């Protein structure tokens, strides 16, 4: 397990939801997919969700599955309305310039060292 | 009219008893669902989830209910001409009923097959329409009842026990 704040430091990450504190969010695992129905069926609480999808329904999917952190890859940021919804739902949004592959690899190493 | 049933054997008699004489619920929540209204779709499921959370339902049961409910809400949004969602909270379980204005499911057994989808391009671009909605509902529910026919409305009823 690592804290989201430690992961942020490894991926040049920006917290898009500064109202939420990444030093308080535990990351035990991740789920990586852009297919929302796949995420709905398989994502679990305690996982970070790494994706390039960034529309409003992404927040609902996180909320329903209990995912507390979404990492947007390749510097592709969601609209302010999406960020507002995430704050309301207490889901921390992270933006990183790295690819989904790099983000996954870095987290995998951090969790398994 | 075609009808589909799937019941978790563990709750078979409770489910049959319930549908034989439906008792009055302790709490009832209802929501309208608009055709292709992806902005508001999910609000009904979020309200159900938050209500159950306040009532002390555990996180794994909450996840099952939220996932099944949201998938069904998205189905009404993506595939129908709009409809409604009525949630009935009981002591031991929740029943969520989705009723839409059509156009109905041509073949329910086929719709249950993982990967089968009739979703349009808009729905697929959003990351839905993978043909996993109904299978996800099946996986997370204790009872799933679907009544539909081509050109008619569809009724989907989902029952989930809190104890699992």
Image: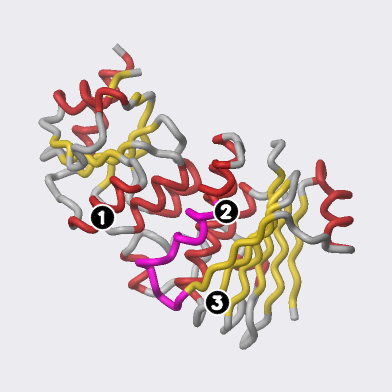
Q: Callout 1: helix, strand or loop?
A: helix
Q: Say which of B36 and A51 sits in front.
A: B36
Mark linked to residue B68: 2
Q: Mark 1 lies on which chain?
A: A
Position of residue A96 in the picture relative to residue B137 (left or right) = left
Magenta span main SS = loop
Determine whether B117 is above or below B100 in the image: above
The alpha-carbon separation of the residues under discs 2 and 3 comes to 17 Å
Q: Nearer the viewer, mark 2 or mark 1?
A: 1
The alpha-carbon separation of the residues under discs 2 and 1 comes to 23 Å
Q: Say which of B86 and A93 sits in front.
A: B86
Marks 2 and 3 in Cβ contact (< 8 Å): no
Determine whether A31 is above or below A26 in the image: below
Q: Are marks 1 and 3 on the same chain?
A: no
Image location of residue B36, percent across then percent down: 40, 75
Image location of residue B125, percent across then percent down: 31, 65
Q: Give the range drawn in magenta.
A: B34-48
Mark linked to residue A41: none
Q: Say which of B17 and A41 sits in front.
A: B17
Residue drawn at the location 40% of the way across and 39% of the way down: A67
Q: In which quarter of the image is the N terminus of chain A?
A: top left
Earlier residue among tags 2 and 3: 2
Residue drawn at the location 34% of the way across and 73% of the way down: B121
Determine whether B136 is above or below A8 in the image: below
Q: Name the residue under label 1.
A: A82
* Mark 3: few/some/many CA within 10 Å (<14, 14-19, 20+): many
Q: Callout 3: helix, strand or loop?
A: strand
Q: Are marks 2 and 3 on the same chain?
A: yes
Q: In which quarter of the image is residue B28?
A: bottom right
Residue drawn at the location 17% of the way across and 37% of the way down: A15
Q: Which chain carries label 2?
A: B
């Amino acid at each position: 397990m690592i804290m989201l704040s430690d992961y942020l430091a490894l991926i040049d990450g920006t917290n898009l939801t500064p109202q939420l504190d990444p030093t308080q969010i535990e990351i035990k695992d991740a789920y990586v997919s852009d297919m929302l129905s796949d995420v709905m069926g398989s994502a679990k609480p305690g996982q970070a969700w790494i994706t390039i999808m960034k529309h409003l329904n992404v927040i609902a999917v996180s909320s329903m599955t209990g995912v507390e952190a979404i990492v947007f890859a390749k510097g592709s940021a969601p609209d302010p309305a999406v960020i507002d919804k995430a704050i309301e739902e207490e889901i921390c949004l992270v933006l990183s310039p790295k690819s989904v592959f790099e983000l996954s690899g870095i987290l995998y190493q951090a969790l398994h060292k | 009219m075609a009808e589909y049933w799937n019941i978790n054997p563990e709750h078979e008699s409770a489910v049959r008893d319930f549908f034989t004489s439906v008792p009055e619920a302790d709490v009832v929540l209802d929501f309208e669902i608009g055709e292709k209204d992806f902005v508001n779709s999910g609000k009904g499921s979020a309200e159900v989830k938050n209500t159950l959370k306040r009532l002390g339902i555990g996180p794994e049961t909450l996840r099952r209910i939220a996932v099944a409910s949201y998938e069904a809400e998205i189905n009404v949004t993506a595939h129908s001409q709009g409809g409604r969602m009525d949630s009935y909270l009981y002591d031991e379980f929740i029943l969520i009923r989705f009723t839409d204005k059509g156009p109905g499911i041509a073949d329910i057994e086929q719709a249950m097959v993982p990967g089968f989808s009739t979703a349009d391009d808009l729905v697929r671009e959003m990351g839905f329409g993978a043909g996993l909605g109904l299978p996800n509902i099946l996986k997370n529910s204790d009872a799933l009842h679907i009544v539909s026919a081509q050109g008619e409305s569809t009724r989907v009823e989902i029952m989930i026990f809190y104890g699992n």
